[in-house]
Amino acid sequence: MSTPAVDLSELEHDALTELVNIGVSRAAASLRNMVGEQVTLSVPSVEVVSRKAAAILIHEREAGELVAVRQDFEGAFSGRALLIFPQSNSLALVKAVTGDELAAVEVEAMESEALSETGNVVLNGCLATMANMLRRPLTMSLQQVLRGDGALFFELAERTDDNGVVLFLYINFSISGRDIRGYIAMLMDLPSLEALKVLIGEFIERVMGVDDLGALA
Amino acid sequence: MTTGAKTSTTGLLKGAAGAWLWDVPAGLLFGDARFADLYGQPAEAAAAGLPTDAFFASIHPDDHMRIRIAVAGVMHGADHFAKEYRLRLEDGAVRWVSAMGRADRDADHRVIAFQGVLADITEQKRVEERLRVAQSAGGVGTFEYVSGFGTVDVSHQFCRLLGLTPTDVLALRAINATLTSGQPLLIGEADGAAGRDEYREFEIVRADSGERRWIARRGERLNDGPGGAERFIGAIHDITPFKSAEAKLLELTATLEERVAERTKERDRVWDNSRDLLVVVDADGVYRAASPAWFRLLGFRPEELVGRPYTEFVEPEDLSASAAVFAEAVKERSLGNFENRHRHKDGGWRWISWQTSTEDGLVYGYGRDVTEEKLRAEALSQTESQLRQAQKMEAVGQLTGGLAHDFNNMLTGIIGGLDLVRRRIAEGRLGDLDRFMDGAVKSAHRAAGLTHRLLAFSRQQSLDPQAVDVRGLIVSMQDLLNRTLGEQVALKVVFADQVWPAVSDVNQLESAILNLAINARDAMPDGGLLTIAARNSIFDTERASGHPEIASGDYVEISVADTGQGMPSDVVAKAFDPFFTTKPIGQGTGLGLSMIYGFVRQIGGHAAIDSEVGKGTTIRMFLPRATPGQLVQESVEPEAASGAGSGETVLVIEDEDSVRALIVEVLSELGYRALEASSSVTALPHLRSDQPIDLVITDVGLPGLNGRQLAAMARELRPGLGILFVTGYAPTAAVRADFLAPGMDMISKPFAMNDLAAKIGEMLARSPTA
């Protein structure tokens, strides 16, 4: 994997993973509320890679068509969040979310809306939790459903330079044994990642600085 | 870190795992005995509740921060806690533990408790380490797949083998996407009965390099997954080198078959198309296989031959030779160019030339039809003999032409002379008759000389080898030579200080020198210089070794050199050949040089030509040096014999009446008494009678008993009786010395009467009976 310009230390990496873990946990709880069934999300693996490498990773791991829910965020660090599923998973996800009560035709008809809503719950839960943990507010844009391959998702429309990095999160979704998996990707440019790095450092300091861990709650 | 999410962490586990409960509102950490044991805390204290920072106290410093952050995450909302970390015990030992925990929250999402289980995974870590090393060293990647899931737990090595970025979990589709099309899934649901999964090989395209590789997979399917789901665990490794070796081997094998097929085809082509007979014969002489050429050459189809012995097809006359050769061939002695005759189906025979080789007791024969060659060779040999005959006839024509020319000249002299004499006598003019008579006699002598030369050429001439004073002979010939050469050619005679006497025949040597002089003259039509020289020449062993045609010894060399046009080398090479002449037909017999050569060889000498175009020609005769015992005979003119006889009795045996009458007439004129007989039979009564006989003159070539046999009988009847042979030639003894016993002599036909008289007188004078 190509080395990104911003290199997180091992501790920063752990801290970031934990931040995502918190965010995803919150998102899973929201999802659980939506589907009313047991939702398990794996402990995420976090990688900071270049945009190109992220596309390769996505391509390697998902050969087929993908569907993604996109949401841009702005604040102390800005970028774009993506919830990516294999296209083949999307209907299963929709069915899980809609509780298997709809006919196939109806499921297809409301697929995009269901995906969009699911994306909103997951991404919003995740990002908002992280922002909260980092004590910085984030403004979220409206979500958008995209279809295509990984390379397309990692293009930042506003910026054509190649300095952007991808915070690549791999999460295995498992909803009541359904074969659903997905990825959360956060695209940020270098200044945003620098900012994030600083915020992570502050987070670590806060965590370490408090002897009584119970007080953190 | 791996599949914690798949195993739900509900309740506290006893036994191997230790359990903890972090009571957040109370700020106490409770642990069971196992937890206390792993954390190095008194079990009672753990059961009663420890301060919460006891959770971090024993953690290895390297993992401390990591775990603190993770716990902070839980406290701030993370649902899962799944960490592996090291605990440092009081004795300094380090244990690896795996902690799985979760947060319990109230309705407001506040954390009430953080609880989980802790397992000692030190051994597992070691095993994992070993496994990792083994996987990386052995190039083996492992996987674990639970039926129904979309992801597969994999080892990093597994990812590397497929060219994927190393990770612990891969999507099933991503794995199977590396396969080239048309193959079963690398990892998927069981396609048969559960149990041991068969060994499978897959071709993949590496995700990173696009390289095609071969992967082997082995695995087991166990029904021990969550909810009884099938768990497929297995390993893959790269077998590309084996595959490519295998492919090469396959290709080699395939091309080998191709090559073998090609060779077989070639062999079949040779077998089918060969113009030669190809045959395989077993040791018993039975045909095992025969090529189609048999039909073309001999009319027999291969199937008519196979199973039958070769003896049925070979000409009976050639059978024994063929059997002997076949026996040799069976003994693995390859034979070549053996020829025998084979039967043709149409009843004819063909000559076949055989080559064989033997292998494993089978004789492989290759037969070529040489019938045509044989016929051609025969025809050639016939043509050659016809050609020789034609050449002979041409030579005879040349000879006859030359002889006729010479004889006509001589006969003209004789007839003309006699004609004139007759006319003069008829006219009564007797004064000047001798001149014409001499001319006629001279011509006749020359004719006699020609026949002598012919005989010398045929080497059937009677030679009279004696010690000859070469110098004296040449000097005596000078006048004759000067006359012969004419005015335009100068003669120069050169002698060494001393010249040995040479073994020769005076007349023949004279003739040879004269002949050479004439040739030289003819070679110098515009005049020149003729040099006749004589000197001693010694051929020691060394010199003679360079001339195989000449024996070592002392020789007298006589050379005749002209300054004429010379001869090219091809003419030189043939100059001594009989009938070879550069003169037009009718102007020479072509026998000159060959007769000289014959004469010189006959007396044990040698002749050589040295010539070059434009530089003249030198002919050298090497005559053997005469031993001191041999007298030098002066050439003497025979004395005129008249009335030499005194009534001695001479018996004349000659079958040719005219010759006999002539001899008798001469004897009578000389005063001898002559007895006549026309054959040995009629002569014997005379010899047996009591009447005195002083001399016998006999022809050699008599009918019935020949002259020599008669002479032998006469000697028995009358020992010491003188015998004079008259001969046209002496076929049984070319050299008279070998022919004649003491008291015998010889005179060649034709002879002058004076010569005969002298010979008779000489013999009777020696005769003991006289």
Image (cartoon, coloured by chain):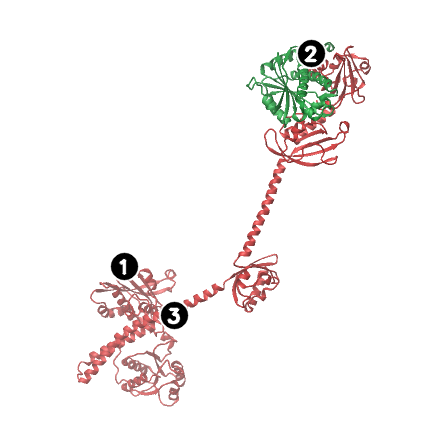
Q: Are marks 1 and 2 in contact (CB under 8 Å)?
A: no
Give the residue type that dot 1 points to: Lys
Q: Which of label 3 and label 1 is nearer to you?
A: 3
- Name the residue that disc number 3 marks: B389
- Can I make out residue B136 in this image? no
Q: Position of residue B327 (x, y in %)?
A: 59, 63
Q: Position of residue B109 (x, y in %)?
A: 74, 13
Q: Both on one chain, marks 2 and 3?
A: no
Residue lying furthest bottom: B690
User: Which residue is drawn at the image coordinates 59% and 42% (left, top)?
Assistant: B251
Q: Are marks 3 and 1 in contact (CB under 8 Å)?
A: no
Q: Both on one chain, marks 1 and 2?
A: no
Q: Nearer the viewer, residue B6 or B27?
A: B6
The correct choice, above or below, for B640 with respect to B390 in the image is below
Q: Which of label 2 and label 3 is nearer to you?
A: 2
- Can I make out residue A21 in this image? yes
Residue A126 falls in which quadrant of the image?
top right
Q: Position of residue A205 (x, y in %)?
A: 67, 11
**Chain that is coloured green in the picture:** A
Find the distance from the CA under tag 2 to the CA under tag 3: 137 Å
Q: Both on one chain, marks 3 and 1?
A: yes
Secondary structure beneath dot 3 equals helix
- Name the residue that disc number 2 marks: A207
